[in-house]
Amino acid sequence: MLKTFDLVLIGVMTATAAVTYTIKHRAELKLEEVHRLEAEIKLEKDTIDLLKADWALQSQPNRLERLVKAYNDELQLQPTASTALVHAKELPMLKFEVPVPDVTEAKANGAAGAGAKGATVASAKGATGTSKIQPIPQPAPRGAAEPHGAVAPDGGAEDDAGADEIETGSVE
């Protein structure tokens, strides 16, 4: 009595119902995830607002003045001199801003017999005799008398291994 066409239609309807249920279930899971993320975002925003309010309370000038007076003997704080402040353009260059010297020219100039060898390297590169060669910065030995971040005569910054660290304090 059931024709094959009826069986095919029943199979298609069952498959369609299964696909529809799967899509609905995935959509509900995504909706739950969206609600969870919105709750996390709200919690983070509330935390940020609370921390901003706490910072405003902690950094009130009256409160800081009272703390300075209370702990003046221990801390021995002094006002910052105007000569201790510098502009950003007066700071030494960052490590990634220092120009990279040409290694082949530096090796040729530093080796014995640099005249012939340097000329060969320069001619191979197509350079003329008027090209300006930048010296290779050499790291200062540990314990040298030169202070951290001193400016070299060629305008570059001589720096040790902590070049990316920011130090605070007065500039002499």
Image (cartoon, rainbow, N blue to C red):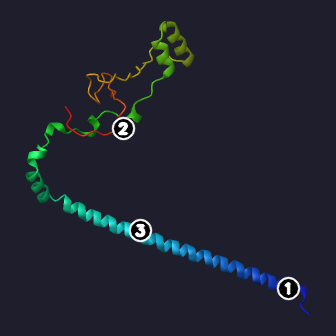
- Would you name the residue on which mark 3 appears? 41
Report the disc number at residue 7.
1
Q: Quadrant of residue 147?
A: top left
Question: Which amino acid lies under the numbered mark 3 shown in the image of this protein?
Answer: Ile
Cα distance, mark 1 to mark 2? 74 Å
- Looking at the rendered structure, the secondary structure element under dot 3 is helix
Q: Position of residue 143 (x, y in %)?
A: 29, 23
Q: Quadrant of residue 91?
A: top left
Quarter of the image containing the C terminus? top left
Q: Residue at left 9%, top 48%?
A: 72
Is label 3 in contact with label 1 (beta carbons under 8 Å)? no
Cα distance, mark 2 to mark 3? 33 Å
Of residue 25 and residue 129, the one placed in the foreground of this image is: 25
Quarter of the image containing the N terminus? bottom right
Answer with mark 3 or mark 1, whichever residue precedes in sequence. 1
Of residue 12 and residue 99, the one placed in the foreground of this image is: 12
Q: Residue at left 12%, top 54%?
A: 67
Answer with mark 2 or mark 3, whichever residue precedes in sequence. 3
Question: Which amino acid lies under the numbered mark 2 shown in the image of this protein?
Answer: Asp
Residue 157, relative to residue 62: is it above or below? above
Question: Which amino acid lies under the numbered mark 1 shown in the image of this protein?
Answer: Leu
- Looking at the rendered structure, the secondary structure element under dot 2 is loop
Answer with mark 1 or mark 2, whichever residue precedes in sequence. 1
Q: Residues within 10 Å of mark 1 (few under 14, many from 20)?
A: few
- Would you name the residue on which mark 2 appears? 164
- Looking at the rendered structure, the secondary structure element under dot 1 is helix
